[in-house]
Image (spheres, helix red, strand yellow):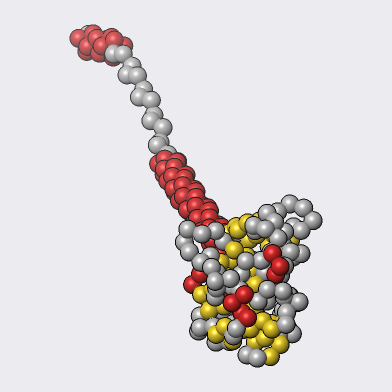
Amino acid sequence: MQDLDFRRKRKKRAGKKTARPRRAKKKPVRRGLRFEDAKAQLHFAQEKIQRNRSGIKELAVWAIEILIVCMAAVFLIAAFGQRVSTAGDSMSPVLKNGDVLLINRLIYRVKSPSRGDIVAFRQNENGHYLVKRIVGLPGETVQIVDGRVLIDGEELTEDIYVSDIGYAGEAQQPVELGEDEYFVMGDAHAVSDDSRLPSIGNVSRDNIYGQAWFIVSPGEDFGFI
């Protein structure tokens, strides 16, 4: 009898026990996904750095190109683009009064002035530029006899643009040119102040500014000389 009561009590105790709640299973952490995300972020960061570097490089190249273009423009203007205006008609018909000329300053660093070149020069720093044609070269003797130009005693027939010269001036007697001196004249010799006058005389190489090569004045004369 006691044994029966003991079993009943045991069953009651077992019934009173509450069932323990099941623990929710933790979802496995996908570590591979986190690694892929980190890898993608790193790749994006590297691409951004590369884009920045590429942008900086392009900007640097662009700046260098601009600098080169500016330097080239300055050089070209300094070498070929200096302007001189003619005063008077002493170089007519090739040049007219008021023509604006471009002067090539570089050419005479490469070679010496030649007979027949139209050059711009001035005899003093405060004077204006004159534009004339070279007739006599260094070391030669120039003389004007009977309206003709003689070089070392012989008549000049090439690269001469004057004839029937009425006024010989200083060249009435033989004019010996130094090692760096040039004798210049205007094509329209009757109205030209040039090496025939004592106020101008022989032109030294250092006083020659450059060779006239282009007329920039608008009009029919625009173009190469």
Residue depicted at x 46% and y 50%: 56
Residue lying furthest bottom? 153
Quadrant of res 111: bottom right
Q: Is residue 104 left or right of residue 30?
A: right
Determine whether 192 is above or below 16 in the image. Answer: below
Residue lying furthest left? 2
Determine whether 90 is above or below 165 in the image. Answer: above
Q: Is residue 93 left or right of residue 104?
A: right
How many numbered marks does the figure carry? 0
Q: Position of residue 112 (x, y in %)?
A: 57, 79
Query: Is there any visible trace of residue 36 in the rendered image?
Result: no
Q: In front: 40, or 7? A: 40
Residue depicted at x 50% and y 55%: 67
Q: In front: 6, or 42? A: 42
Residue depicted at x 40% and y 37%: 29
Q: Position of residue 90 (x, y in %)?
A: 69, 64
Determine whether 55 is above or below 221 in the image. Answer: above
Query: Is there any visible trace of residue 97 in the rendered image?
Result: yes
Q: In front: 98, or 163? A: 163
Residue depicted at x 66% and y 66%: 192
Q: Position of residue 8 (x, y in %)?
A: 27, 9
Q: Position of residue 18 (x, y in %)?
A: 31, 13
Quarter of the rendering occupied by the C terminus: bottom right
Quadrant of res 93: bottom right
Quarter of the rendering occupied by the N terminus: top left
